[in-house]
Every structure is written in C-alpha cells, then in structure tokens.
C-alpha cells in the first residue's frame, strides 16, 4: 500500500554535530480510537496507529508498538546519535493497514 | 513580575475594591503551562499546521487576498467586533464570511476541523499581544447584553459566572483551579476533548456545569458573552492556541 | 479513594466499558510474558509520571535507563504497563545502540488511579523494573456534567 501523508510535527535541533545524541520529538494527528463494545453503545471497531518505525538514512533506529492506551494525537520523544546529514523517515501503521509517512531532515555538521 | 509582587496582587485588588483579572496562564498547572509554551509538545500545533496549509488553498485562496498569514498579527486580539453591517462577529464568524462571500464556498461550519485549524493559525499570529476589543460605539449595546448574561444567576445551581470566576478564582473545584474565565486561550486543545475546540464549546460546558440552558455555538448569547469576556481581558495577552486539561 | 477512582472511571467511559473484568489477570500475564522467568532488578531505571494527574486522557510519562548503549550492552526494549487499564501493555519501545541513550517519553491514557510499571530489557538478558502509583482526578464543568 502506498504511504499517505499525515499531519505531524517533528522537532529536531536545527543542526547537530557528528556523534551527538539528539532528542527527537514527534506529535502526530490521530484520534487513537478505542474499540467500543458495551451494552447500549453502538459498537465501534478499534482504529489506532499501532506501530511507528523510524529509519535514519535508510536504517531502522527506533520502533514503537502503540496500544489504545496511548493518548490521542500521540506524543513521543526518543534519542538518536547524529551520524550523517540525512532523512529520518517516520512511518505509522494504522489498524486496517493504511501506512502514513513523514520525513524530517537531520543536518549534521 | 517577581513572585512576591504577584502574591501581593490579590491583596492590592481587595484594597482597591477592583476585580483582579489575571491571564489564564497564571492559573494553569506548571506542566500544562510549560507545554502551552512549547510547540514541540502542544498538540494544538497540529491544527496550526493544518490551518497554515488551508490558508494557501481555495479559489481565490485566503493568501491571495491577505498575503502571508503573518499579516494577521493583532487581528484575533480585536475580536469579537461589530462589522460594517452591524453584526457582531467572532473570529470564526469572520472567517466564515470570507469563506462564503469572498470564496463563494459553503461555510465550514462551527466546530469543524478546517474552521478550528484556520482560527488557531490566525489567532497564533496574535499570541502574546494584548487583547484590544472595542467596547464603545456599536459594540456598547452588545457588551451590555454580555455583561448581563455574565452577572445573572443561572441554572439549577443558581450561580452567576462571576461567583466562580471572580469570587472564587484561584480556588480548586474538583481538581480544576478556577481562572477568571477568559476566552484568550481559544481555540484551545483540551485534554478532556482530546481535540481542539472553540470558546463557545467551552461555554456550553460551563452552562451545563451550573445546569443552565446551553446555547448553540455562534449564538447571540455566546457572542455577546464572548465580547464581555474579551472586555475583561483587554490588555491581557492572547494565549491561543491554548492548552487546557 | 473509592469516589476518586469511580469518578476517574467516568472520565474515560469508553476505556472503562471495555474492561473485560480481569485487568489484574491481564496485567500479570503481560508482565510475566515480558519477564519470561527473569527476576527484574529494581534499579538502574527511572520512571517519571506525575503522582496526581489532572486528566486520565493524557498523562506525561518518561523512562530513563542507565546503559552504556554499546553494541555489546544496550537496552533493547522498554515496556510500559498500566495495572488497571483494559489493555495493560500500553507501549513497547524498541531501541538499538544508535539511540545513544535509553530515554523515551510519551503520553498515556489512564482508566483510573493505579500502578504504572516500566520494564527494560538489556541485550545481555537482564531486566530492570520501576513502578509508580498515580492518582487520576476528573475536572469540573466537563461536558458530561
């Protein structure tokens, strides 16, 4: 399936030195809908982003498995060692198989 | 302002007999206040991003007539205001007019995602600027209506807005710290909502809180009330897009 | 305490509605699946979460594990568990030495007041565990009255 763009804010330092540990902050627009299956309520299937993968210049550097226990519009912070100037590619997989994608460039000096 | 000076403020207000109206950010928990100031951690910025994208869309686009969105600096601080045709418009109402009259499209609709996104992106341009709504001239009559609403006891609990937001500001109510009930942070991302929402949506919650009638979004009641709240906030900073629990 | 948690449950009706009635069992099962018989060290790991949360919809949480993060010795996974959530395993972060530090943060939903647990696994097979109690309160003037 072709990845679809998604509203996200990825915050990186404006530039980093080679070998520096940088903090990556990610906000992504998604309601993270929990399944509703209770008497008197219309059943709703779960629809969340269940996996996030992050590659850096093509190599996977981080992965997260999300559950319905993650807040709507998920926020995430992790670190990565700056190696070369390159793209961090974020792909989220949603229940049902849709893949969303965003990129952010890390400039290494 | 130093800490000590701030502590003195309520006392001063008491001595002067004046209502002490403080920026809402002063009442927020340290965590929420810090996140409100941090675009990398404030989910409201997701709406700002979408609003900035919408600014460039449409035929003609908002940008085609208005230029860069940065040119909207100070605009949100002047709303609500009375338009040339005599109607009281809040920022959302103003955007809807451009949408229908200048773009020839059907209205986005109150509380719709694109309207909230545009309002957030436009309001952000005024962040930190002092609220400066007109209260005289054609606004005066609307203002009085809003004041009346604010001061009237309502609902099964028979409470006026001011009984909480003036007399009990700073006190806790079921885990909330009662603020001065200003609209300066709206549209705001509320954790309770899990999304961005308008001031009118927030006002409906306060009406329900005292078991009083809830008016429709964009109703005359809430528009005039919004104007009165803004007059109370005149001189205080715009905080939108706010972050609320 | 009882009223507090009841209110907190009301704050997240959907989550509460989905509780199969055996959250405690699910939590124990999820925990032992991760530990796989290993005894966790209750040190070398810091879990930060506010003791009192103003809203169960979004609670800030961060985990930091002491680790050299070298190829030979690094953290491979950090798990977050919420004892009384309908789905106790809230998130799993997979790390490599390229992370440089074993430090993650996110925001979670809490159905009610409960214990939050973080478990970290090292590339050498060791496990570290930290736990924190959190109280969840519901605000005033919510749309549900």
Image (spheres, coloured by chain):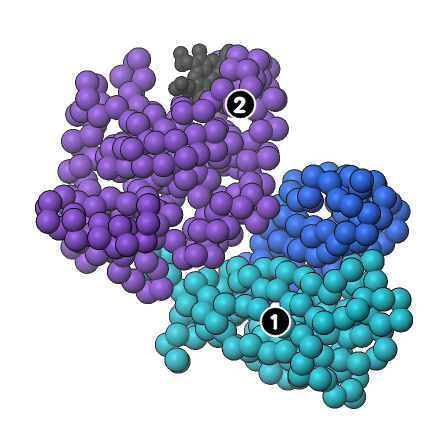
Chain colours: A blue, B purple, C cyan
Q: Residues within 10 Å of mark 1 (few under 14, many from 20)?
A: many
Q: Name the residue under label 2.
A: B69
Say which residue appears at 69% left-offset and 63% top-offset. C103
Quadrant, the C terminus of chain C: bottom left
Instruction: Please give left or right for residue B159 compared with residue A80 in the image.
Output: left
Q: For numbered disc 2, what is the local secondary structure?
A: helix
Q: In this view, does B206 lie to the left or right of B142?
A: right
Residue A20 in sight here? yes
Q: Check the image and report above or below for A109 versus A35.
A: above
Tell me what residue is drawn at x 29 percent, y 62 percent. B172
Q: Where is residue B158 in the image (x, y as percent from the top left)?
A: 16, 55
Q: Quadrant of the N terminus of chain C?
A: bottom left
- Residue C69, quarter of picture: bottom right
- The foreground one among C115 and A50 is C115
Which sits in the foreground, B105 or B37?
A: B37
Is residue C65 left or right of B141 when viewed as pictured? right
Reading the image, the residue beneath label 1 is C47
Above or below — where is A106 with respect to C74?
A: above
């Amino acid at each position: 399936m072709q990845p679809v763009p998604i509203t996200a804010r990825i915050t990186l330092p404006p530039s980093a030195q080679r070998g520096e540990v940088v903090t990556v902050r990610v906000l992504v627009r998604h309601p993270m809908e929990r399944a509703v299956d209770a008497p008197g309520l219309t059943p709703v299937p779960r629809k969340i982003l269940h996996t996030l993968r992050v590659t850096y210049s093509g190599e996977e550097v981080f992965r997260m498995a999300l559950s319905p226990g993650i807040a709507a519009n998920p926020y995430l912070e992790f670190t990565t060692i700056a190696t070369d100037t390159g793209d961090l590619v974020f792909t989220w997989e949603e229940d049902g198989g849709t893949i969303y994608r965003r990129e952010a460039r890390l400039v290494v000096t | 302002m130093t800490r000590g000076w701030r502590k003195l403020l309520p006392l001063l207000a008491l001595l002067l007999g004046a209502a002490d109206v403080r920026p809402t950010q002063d009442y927020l928990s340290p965590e929420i206040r810090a996140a409100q100031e941090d675009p990398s951690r404030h989910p409201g910025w997701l709406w700002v991003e979408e609003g900035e994208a919408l600014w460039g869309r449409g035929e003609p686009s908002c940008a085609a007539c208005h230029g860069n969105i940065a040119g909207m600096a100070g605009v949100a601080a002047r709303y609500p205001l009375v338009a040339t045709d005599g109607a009281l418009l809040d920022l959302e109402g103003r955007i809807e007019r451009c949408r229908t009259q200048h773009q020839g499209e059907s209205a986005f609709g109150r509380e719709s995602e694109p309207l909230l996104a545009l309002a957030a992106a436009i309001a952000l341009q005024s962040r930190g600027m002092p609220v400066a709504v007109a209260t005289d001239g054609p606004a005066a009559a609307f203002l009085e209506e809003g004041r009346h609403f604010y001061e009237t006891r309502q609902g099964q609990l028979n409470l006026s807005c001011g009984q909480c937001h003036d007399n009990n500001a700073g006190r806790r109510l079921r885990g909330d710290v009662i603020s001065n009930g200003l609209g300066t942070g709206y549209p705001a991302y509320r954790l309770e909502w899990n999304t961005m929402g308008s001031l009118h949506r927030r006002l409906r919650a306060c009406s329900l809180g005292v078991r009083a009638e809830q008016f429709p979004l964009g109703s005359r009641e809430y528009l005039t009330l919004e104007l009165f709240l803004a007059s109370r906030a005149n001189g205080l900073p715009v905080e939108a897009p706010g972050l609320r629990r | 305490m009882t009223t507090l948690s009841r209110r907190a449950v009301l704050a997240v009706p959907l989550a509460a509605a989905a509780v199969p009635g055996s959250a405690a069992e699910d939590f124990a099962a999820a925990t032992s699946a991760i530990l796989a018989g290993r005894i966790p060290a209750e040190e070398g790991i810091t879990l930060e979460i506010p003791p009192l949360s103003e809203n169960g919809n979004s609670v800030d949480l961060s985990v930091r594990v002491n680790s050299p993060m070298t190829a030979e010795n690094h953290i491979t996974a950090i798990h977050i568990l919420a004892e009384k959530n309908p789905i106790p395993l809230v998130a799993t972060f997979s790390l490599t030495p390229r992370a440089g530090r074993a430090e993650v943060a996110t925001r979670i939903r809490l159905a009610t007041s409960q214990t939050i647990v973080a478990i970290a696994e090292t590339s050498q097979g060791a496990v570290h565990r930290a736990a924190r109690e959190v109280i969840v309160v519901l605000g005033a003037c919510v749309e549900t009255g």
